[in-house]
Image (tube, grey):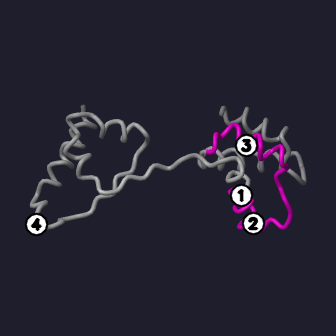
Amino acid sequence: MAKDAFLQDIAILFNFQMDSINPFILIMAGLPHLKTRLTLTHHRPLSQRVIAKFEIQPLSREEVAKYIDHHMKIAGAKMPIFTESAIEAIALRSQGWPRVINKLTINSLLFGSQLKKEQIDEEIVRLAIEDSSL
């Protein structure tokens, strides 16, 4: 499999004089299946050379509210744009993943603008969810 061959090639690069010098630093980023791949027996040598591991977790409901509020303030909002029920709907549907939060908030803002709404409520978020197929 091509993905396995790539990981094996990376492991070979780390074998180069690893005891005497550190020839380079590699930052690997990927979806959750990368972590699963690295746990396979034939990738153990590479996994053992990983110095630090970090896994991004989804945002909590409170963090989603702060995330949306922060981005709205950066955009210049002077008052709350999203109602509490709208934020709750976004938090539930996105499961706290920032990429999905971004997509839902942007689509909600677009629908709200089209409907000439001053605030984004749960109904507008529902329209954004349906339109986004999320």
Which sits earlier in the primary sequence, circle 1 or circle 3?
1
Residue 88 magenta: yes
Label 4 Cα neighbours within 10 Å, binned few <14 / some 14-19 / many ≥20: few
- The residues bearing labels 2 and 3 have C-alpha atoms spaced at a distance of 18 Å
Range of residues picked out in magenta? 67-96
Q: Quadrant of the C terminus?
A: top right
Residue closer to the observer: 53 or 109: 53
Which sits earlier in the primary sequence, circle 2 or circle 3?
2
Residue 82 magenta: yes
Give the residue at x 19% y 44%: 45
Give the number of the mark in front: 4 or 2. Answer: 4
- Using residue 92 as the reference point, say whether residue 38 is left or right of it: left
Q: Amino acid at mark 2?
A: Lys
What residue is pinned by disc 4? 20
Which sits earlier in the primary sequence, circle 4 or circle 2?
4
What residue is pinned by disc 1? 66
- The residues bearing labels 4 and 1 have C-alpha atoms spaced at a distance of 47 Å
Give the number of the mark in front: 4 or 1. Answer: 4
What residue is pinned by disc 2? 73
- The residues bearing labels 2 and 1 have C-alpha atoms spaced at a distance of 10 Å
Q: Are marks 1 and 3 in contact (CB under 8 Å)?
A: no
Residue closer to the observer: 43 or 132: 43
Give the residue at x 22% y 41%: 44
Q: Quadrant of the N terminus?
A: top left
Q: Amino acid at mark 1?
A: Lys
- The residues bearing labels 4 and 2 have C-alpha atoms spaced at a distance of 50 Å
Q: Amino acid at mark 3?
A: Ile
Tag on residue 90? 3
Dominant SS type (magenta): helix
Q: Amino acid at mark 4?
A: Ser
Give the residue at x 28% y 53%: 50
Q: Residue 38 lies in what quarter of the image? A: top left
